[in-house]
Amino acid sequence: MSPRDFARLAWLNRHLPGVWTSTRRRRRILFLALAAPGFLAVFGTTYHHNFFVMLAGFALFGAAVAFRAVSEPLFVQAASDDLLPSPHSASHKDSPDA
């Protein structure tokens, strides 16, 4: 892991609770929680009545997708380098399909 990636990972670990980022499944739930307001703004409003709410929804959803695209490779690399402590016992594996 490069020093730049390590600095990004340290920043994420400082700003996000460890419980949210400890497993792949929890990170996906975090992504869904971040994406939900934008998704609801886009698909919960009628387009012809409030165009700016739809645009804000796309921006929020895009931000959640960008956050996931940037942060997930860092967490996967840190897990493979054993930089993050495992929250589970050795008998419990987090499935890659989670």
Image (cartoon, rainbow, N blue to C red):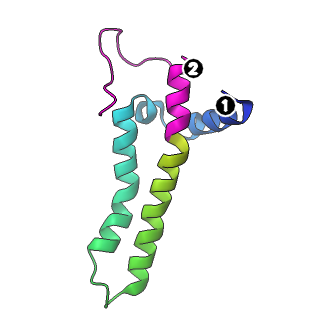
For the residues labelled 1 and 2, say whether their Cβ atoms are less than 8 Å apart. Answer: yes
Q: Is residue 57 above or below residue 19?
A: below
Q: Is residue 16 above or below residue 41?
A: above
**Could you give the CA–CA distance between mark 1 and mark 2, rounded to whole angstroms?**
10 Å
Looking at the image, which residue is at 55% across and 25% down? 78
In the structure shown, which secondary structural element does the residue marked by tag 1 occupy?
Answer: helix
Looking at the image, which residue is at 33% across and 23% down? 94
In front of the other: 41 or 16: 41
Quadrant housing the C terminus: top left
Tell me: 49 left or right of 20: left
Callout 1 environment at 10 Å: few (<14), some (14 to 19), or many (20+)? Answer: some
Callout 2 environment at 10 Å: few (<14), some (14 to 19), or many (20+)? Answer: few
In front of the other: 20 or 54: 54
Looking at the image, which residue is at 56% across and 19% down? 81
Disc sitting over residue 83 in the figure: 2
Magenta portion: prevailing SS class: loop
Tell me which corner region of the image, top left, top right, bottom left or bottom right, holds residue 15.
Answer: top right
**Residue segment shown in magenta:** 72-97
| Image coords of residue 92 (percent x, y) | 30, 15
| Image coords of residue 30 (percent x, y) | 39, 44
Q: Does the magenta stretch include residue 76?
A: yes
| Image coords of residue 18 (percent x, y) | 47, 31
User: On the image, numbered disc 1 is attached to which residue?
Assistant: 6
Q: Does the magenta stretch include residue 55?
A: no
